[in-house]
Image: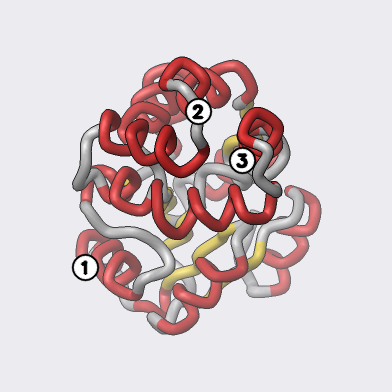
Amino acid sequence: MIKYILFDLGGVVIDFYNEDDYYPYISRISGIREERVARIINYDIRVDLDRGTVPQKVFERKMMQQFGIKRKQIQWYEFYTKKATLYRGTLDIISRLHGKYKVGYLSNTDRSRYTYTVGKLLKPYLKLFDYRFASCDIHLRKPGKEIYRYALRRMHAKAGETVFIDNQIENVVGANKAGIKSILFTNAKDLEKRLRKMGIGL
């Protein structure tokens, strides 16, 4: 029986994709192909920033070195605060789940963006989340199995009692490897259908 439901934030609860906005911007100003920009940032530059193990200035220095840009051009935080909005459809689902299930979020996020997210975007809705796990707080990052196991321990939950929802396939696979049932998010309508199919009441 499902008792716990964990949501990713960016791309699931928060409508913001680096792929749509930020990576094309860095590609334009650096002259480096978008695919390479995404690969460099995702798998090298931002990993430790998301884990909260390096300060913002280290991230910025790496960005400047890798892409040959100036500090004022980085705009990592600024792009997010200008573009990020809420997925109302997902929030509606969460509000209907709240009280029937233990609901939480499990997000890869750096300190600056996370502070804005909880202090501004999600502030009126934080009461809907029984558990809040951010990579920058717990120094672990998806899709490593350790972060899913950490969340299970903190919730006192079993993997078989838990569902995880993310828009990135590698994070869904990571949760599956930790024994957690997972859903690849595409939109709120599809998510509701998949949850109902799993016997989750809305």
Task: Identify the residue position indicated by label 3 in the image.
Answer: 18
Percent position of residue 140, x then y: 27, 59
First reached walking from the N terminus: tag 3 or tag 1: 3
In the displayed structure image, the side of residue 48 where residue 80 appears, left or right? right
| Amino acid carrying mark 3 in the image | Asn
| Callout 1: SS | helix
Of tags 2 and 1, which is closer to the observer? 2
Question: What's the distance in space between the residues labelled 2 and 1, CA to CA?
Answer: 42 Å
Percent position of residue 139, x then y: 22, 53
Quadrant of the rendered image containing residue 201: bottom right
- Identify the residue at image location x=43%, y=68%: 143
Task: Identify the residue position indicated by label 1 in the image.
Answer: 153
| Callout 2: SS | loop
Above or below, 146 relative to 44: below
* Figure quadrant of the C terminus: bottom right
Q: Which mark is residue 69?
A: 2
First reached walking from the N terminus: tag 3 or tag 2: 3
Of tags 3 and 1, which is closer to the observer? 3
Most foreground residue, 127 or 115: 115
Question: What's the distance in space between the residues labelled 3 and 1, CA to CA?
Answer: 30 Å
- Identify the residue at image location x=67%, y=30%: 25
Mark 3 neighbour density, 10 Å: few (under 14) some (14–19) many (20 or more): some
- Identify the residue at image location x=28%, y=44%: 136
| Amino acid carrying mark 2 in the image | Ile
In the displayed structure image, the side of residue 30 where residue 161 appears, left or right? left
